[in-house]
Image: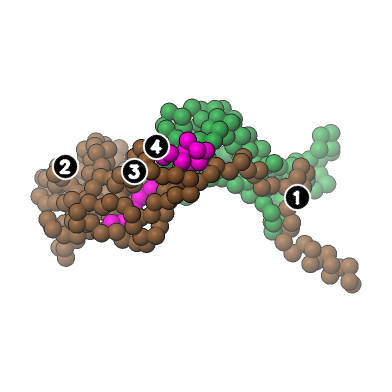
Amino acid sequence: MALMPKRVKHRKSQRGRIKGKATRGNRVVFGDFGLQATQGGWVSAQTIEAGRVAASQYLRSEGRLYIRVFPHKSITSIPLETRMGKGKGEPEFWAAVVRPGTVLYEIGGVSEEAARMCFSRLAHKMPVRVRFVRRRAV
Amino acid sequence: MAEALNVKKRASRGKREAKRLREAGSIPAILYGHGEANESLVIVADEMSAVIRHGGRVVELKGAVNEKAFIRELQWDVYGVEVLHVDFARVSEHERVEVKVKVELRGEAPGVKDGGAVEHLLHEIEIDCEALSIPEKIGVSIRELKIGDAITAGELKLPDGAKLVGDPDDVIVHCVVHREEEEVEGGAEGAEPEVIGRKAEDEEEGEE
């Protein structure tokens, strides 16, 4: 089941602009290795879940996966063959707003080789360009 | 043995000058402490990366300034690739400093073979030790870690003269039974989250 907020203040939000780079959530904090976005974009809840499933299938019972992004933004759309106007569409899905530098996933408790393999499977599913990062020296 | 770092004095100020320095392969830095005047410095980026790679915490500054300094803070770019600025603090030989040191797990836990998983909760600990004897990392053996066992910060073997700063009951690593693949919390297909304040408004309208 895809992630979504439990309670929201407003059902619909404006599209917004993704400006600048991630000044928070840009470091590996919980695990040893991370997958960092180098591009901005929306990552849908379905994509986040697909990444989690791909990683857990590869890792099986080893290690631990941390998801560092949450889909807080509702994305609306209007149905096909509908005339323009008549107000904003209905919420279709939920997405996480990702800025360049955001760490999307982290893995702990596995070797670097295993983490690289796992993230390469996961990276194919991501709608933004990503790179492999290690926990930074103190 | 502290690594040597060539430094020059920096007369320039401001972000435009700092940007030019970085483009030329240098890093702006500052030296302070011991009640003496602050010194604005420039260091070579490659030399600094080598110090970081080797896990050096105290460096021997040479050139415009000749003294030992402790790397107090590193400023990184968004991607964590390049160092933007370095803070050096003056240190004397037997001065004590509080510093964060990496904790490294060693060996394989027997609990893993029994179906458990090792979770490394605390990757660095803060210790108080002499500036010239800061350890690069602190090793923790998990060769006797069974399911349900935990190693706390108080149980770590610290180098001679070092003291733990912080709670000794903090769990560094533990071995727990791996949970079944948990369902990610979320609503059913097509479900919508509760809208804050919406219900109250609806009820009020109904009453009227």
Quadrant of the image containing the N terminus of chain B: top left
Q: Residues within 10 Å of mark 1 (few under 14, many from 20)?
A: some
Q: Is residue B114 on the magenta stretch? A: yes
| Sequence-first tag of 4 and 2 | 2
Residue type at the position of mark 2? Glu
Q: Is residue B103 left or right of residue A100?
A: left
- Which residue corresponds to mark 4? B108
Rendered location of residue B114, percent (x, y):
50, 38
* Distance between mark 3 and mark 1 Cα atoms: 48 Å
Inter-mark Cα distance, 2 to 1? 59 Å
Q: CA distance from mark 4 to mark 2?
A: 34 Å
Task: Say what secondary structure mark 3 lies in.
Answer: strand
Please give the name of the residue rendered at 68% of the width and 42% of the height, measured from the top-left corner: A2
Residue type marked 3? Ser
Q: Earlier in the sequence, mark 3 or mark 4?
A: 4
Work out whether residue B74 or residue A90 is closer to the camera in this orientation and state it: B74
Q: Is residue B29 above or below residue B96?
A: above
Q: Secondary structure at mark 4?
A: loop
Q: Are marks 3 and 4 on the same chain?
A: yes
Identify the magenta region: B109-127
Residue with the mark numbered 1: B192
What color is chain A drawn in? green
Q: Which residue is mark 2?
A: B3
Residue found at x 22% / y 44%: B56
Mark with earlier residue (2, 3)? 2
Mark 3 or mark 1, whichever is nearer to me: 3
Residue type at tag 4: Glu
Numbered mark located on residue B141 in the image: 3
- Chain letter, disc 3 residue: B
Q: Colour of chain B?
A: brown
Q: Is residue A55 visible?
A: no
